[in-house]
Image (cartoon, helix red, strand yellow):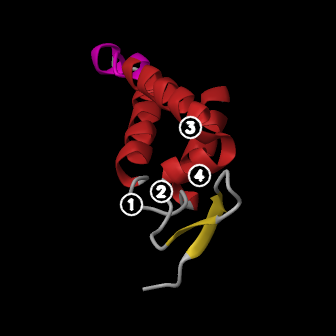
Protein backbone atom coordinates (compact mmCIF):
# COMPACT_ATOMS: atom_id res chain seq x y z
CA UNK A 1 0.00 0.00 0.00
CA UNK A 2 1.06 3.54 -0.62
CA UNK A 3 1.39 5.88 2.30
CA UNK A 4 -1.62 8.03 3.12
CA UNK A 5 -1.91 11.27 1.17
CA UNK A 6 -3.29 14.55 2.44
CA UNK A 7 -6.78 15.13 1.07
CA UNK A 8 -7.55 18.39 2.83
CA UNK A 9 -8.22 19.81 6.24
CA UNK A 10 -11.21 19.37 8.54
CA UNK A 11 -12.93 22.33 10.21
CA UNK A 12 -10.83 21.82 13.35
CA UNK A 13 -7.58 22.07 11.35
CA UNK A 14 -6.61 18.40 11.43
CA UNK A 15 -5.65 16.76 8.16
CA UNK A 16 -7.86 14.36 6.22
CA UNK A 17 -5.89 11.53 4.66
CA UNK A 18 -6.67 8.77 2.17
CA UNK A 19 -4.76 5.80 0.84
CA UNK A 20 -6.82 4.89 -2.22
CA UNK A 21 -6.83 6.34 -5.70
CA UNK A 22 -9.06 9.27 -6.52
CA UNK A 23 -11.77 8.69 -9.09
CA UNK A 24 -13.59 11.21 -11.24
CA UNK A 25 -15.79 12.06 -8.26
CA UNK A 26 -12.69 12.87 -6.22
CA UNK A 27 -11.55 15.40 -8.82
CA UNK A 28 -14.99 17.00 -8.91
CA UNK A 29 -15.10 17.10 -5.10
CA UNK A 30 -11.67 18.75 -4.91
CA UNK A 31 -12.76 21.38 -7.46
CA UNK A 32 -16.00 22.46 -5.83
CA UNK A 33 -16.93 20.38 -2.83
CA UNK A 34 -20.23 18.62 -2.26
CA UNK A 35 -22.49 21.19 -4.03
CA UNK A 36 -20.38 21.02 -7.19
CA UNK A 37 -20.39 17.21 -7.06
CA UNK A 38 -24.20 17.22 -6.87
CA UNK A 39 -24.53 19.75 -9.71
CA UNK A 40 -22.14 17.83 -11.96
CA UNK A 41 -23.98 14.58 -11.19
CA UNK A 42 -27.26 16.16 -12.25
CA UNK A 43 -25.63 17.58 -15.40
CA UNK A 44 -24.10 14.19 -16.23
CA UNK A 45 -27.49 12.49 -15.85
CA UNK A 46 -29.19 15.16 -17.97
CA UNK A 47 -26.63 14.74 -20.77
CA UNK A 48 -26.95 10.95 -20.69
CA UNK A 49 -30.74 11.31 -20.98
CA UNK A 50 -30.45 13.87 -23.80
CA UNK A 51 -27.96 11.91 -25.87
CA UNK A 52 -29.72 8.58 -25.31
CA UNK A 53 -32.36 9.76 -27.77
CA UNK A 54 -29.69 9.30 -30.44
CA UNK A 55 -30.50 5.58 -30.43
CA UNK A 56 -33.82 6.48 -32.05
CA UNK A 57 -32.53 9.08 -34.52
CA UNK A 58 -29.21 7.27 -35.16
CA UNK A 59 -27.33 10.56 -35.23
CA UNK A 60 -23.66 9.48 -35.35
CA UNK A 61 -22.42 12.64 -33.60
CA UNK A 62 -24.75 12.20 -30.63
CA UNK A 63 -24.04 8.47 -30.52
CA UNK A 64 -20.33 9.29 -30.25
CA UNK A 65 -20.99 11.76 -27.44
CA UNK A 66 -23.15 9.19 -25.67
CA UNK A 67 -20.40 6.57 -25.98
CA UNK A 68 -17.89 9.05 -24.55
CA UNK A 69 -20.16 9.87 -21.61
CA UNK A 70 -20.76 6.19 -20.90
CA UNK A 71 -17.01 5.59 -21.06
CA UNK A 72 -16.43 8.34 -18.51
CA UNK A 73 -19.25 7.07 -16.31
CA UNK A 74 -18.18 3.44 -16.28
CA UNK A 75 -14.40 3.46 -16.54
CA UNK A 76 -13.87 6.82 -14.84
CA UNK A 77 -14.76 5.23 -11.52
CA UNK A 78 -11.71 3.00 -11.73
CA UNK A 79 -9.18 5.54 -13.01
CA UNK A 80 -7.46 8.13 -10.85
CA UNK A 81 -7.52 10.70 -13.63
CA UNK A 82 -9.09 10.47 -17.05
CA UNK A 83 -6.48 9.35 -19.50
CA UNK A 84 -5.71 11.16 -22.72
CA UNK A 85 -7.74 8.76 -24.84
CA UNK A 86 -11.13 10.17 -23.81
CA UNK A 87 -9.93 13.77 -24.01
CA UNK A 88 -8.56 13.23 -27.52
CA UNK A 89 -11.82 11.51 -28.52
CA UNK A 90 -13.82 14.55 -27.45
CA UNK A 91 -11.38 16.83 -29.31
CA UNK A 92 -11.74 14.77 -32.52
CA UNK A 93 -15.53 14.83 -32.18
CA UNK A 94 -15.49 18.62 -31.96
CA UNK A 95 -13.13 18.93 -34.94
CA UNK A 96 -15.06 16.49 -37.17
CA UNK A 97 -18.40 18.03 -36.25
CA UNK A 98 -17.17 21.37 -37.62
CA UNK A 99 -16.04 19.89 -40.98
For the residues labelled 2 and 4, the Cα–Cα distance comes to: 7 Å
Q: Residue at x 59, y 52 (%)?
A: 27
Mark with earlier residue (3, 4): 4
Seen from the viewer's position, the closer of residues 61 and 66 is 66
For the residues labelled 3 and 4, the Cα–Cα distance comes to: 11 Å
CB under 8 Å between discs 2 and 4? yes
What are the residue bounds of the magenta stretch? 50-57
Mark with earlier residue (2, 1): 2
Q: Residue at x 40, y 53 (%)?
A: 77
CB under 8 Å between discs 2 and 1? yes
**39 to 14, vertically: above or below:** above
Q: Which mark is residue 95?
A: none
Q: Which mark is residue 34?
A: 3
Residue 87 in percent (x, y) is at 59, 50
For the residues labelled 1 and 3, the Cα–Cα distance comes to: 20 Å
> In what quadrant of the picture does the N terminus appear?
bottom left
Q: Nearer the viewer, mark 4 or mark 1?
A: 4
According to the picture, the residue beneath numbered tag 1 turns out to be: 78
Q: Secondary structure at mark 4?
A: helix
Mark with earlier residue (4, 1): 4
Q: Secondary structure at mark 2?
A: loop
According to the picture, the residue beneath numbered tag 4 turns out to be: 27
According to the picture, the residue beneath numbered tag 2 turns out to be: 23
Q: Quadrant of residue 68?
A: top left
Amino acid sequence: MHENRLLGYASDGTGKFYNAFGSVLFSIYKDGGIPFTIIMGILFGFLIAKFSHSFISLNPYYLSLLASLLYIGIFGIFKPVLSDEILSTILFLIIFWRL
